[in-house]
Amino acid sequence: MGHRLTNIQNQALTASLRSGELGSLLQPLVKEIHLFDTFVAGTMNLKDPTVLQDLTCGQLLMLVRETNKFDENEIVILKENGQRIGYIPRQDNLIFARLMDAGKSLRAKINSLEVNPDFSKIAIGIYMVDV
C-alpha cells in the first residue's frame, strides 16, 4: 500500500513539473537527451541581423514548429525573448518535426558561433527535454 501512495505522489509531482507549477525547483530532475548537432540556417536573411550580436556559447534556444509553402517540416530557432535567429536546416528537420508534432519538447544549445557582418556560422546541439 505504501508503494502505491508513493507512485501516485510521483505521478502528481511529474505532472506539476511538466506544467511549470513548481518553477525551477526541480529543474535538476529534467533530463536533456542530446540528439544531433547542426548549424543555424537562414541567418543571412534576417530582417534585423543585430539579434545575433549578443548570442553566447552555451545559450539555450527555443525550437518552434512552423509550416510554410516551402517546407512543411520547418522549425524556427528563437532566442528566449522570442527573437528569430534562423531555422533548423531543411535536410536535418524531418525527424525533429515529427518528434515535436508528437508532443516532444526540443530545444537547442549553442555549441560555437562566429558572427560577422557578411556571414554568421552558429553551431547548435539539439536536445530532447525529458522529465
Image (tube, rainbow, N blue to C red):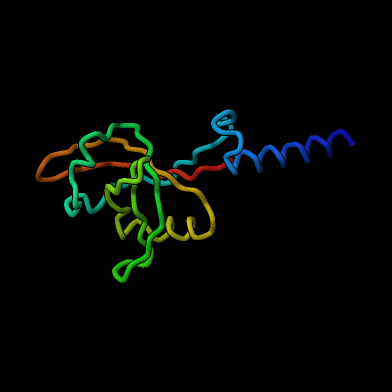
Which of the pair 23/71 is nearer the observer?
23
Q: Where is residue 21 in the image (x, y as percent from the top left)?
A: 61, 38
Measured as percent of width and height from the top left, residue 118 is found at 9, 45
Query: In which quadrant of the rendered image does the N terminus lie?
Result: top right
Q: Does residue 21 appear left or right of residue 99 in this picture?
A: right
Residue 56 location, x and y as percent?
Answer: 28, 32
What residue is rendered at 32% in x and 53% in y? 88
Displayed quadrant of residue 3: top right
Q: Going by the image, does 67 lie left or right of 120? A: right
**Residue 68 in the image, given as x and y percentages of width and height:** 33, 67
Q: Please give the name of the residue rendered at 43% of the width and 55% of the height, measured from the top-left corner.
A: 96
Against 89, is 70 above or below?
below
Residue at point 55%, 42% (across, down): 130
Q: Which residue is drawn at 18% across and 54% down?
A: 45
Q: Which residue is farthest left?
A: 118
Dividing the image into 4 quarters, which one contains the C terminus?
A: top right
Comparing 36 with 22, the one in front is 22
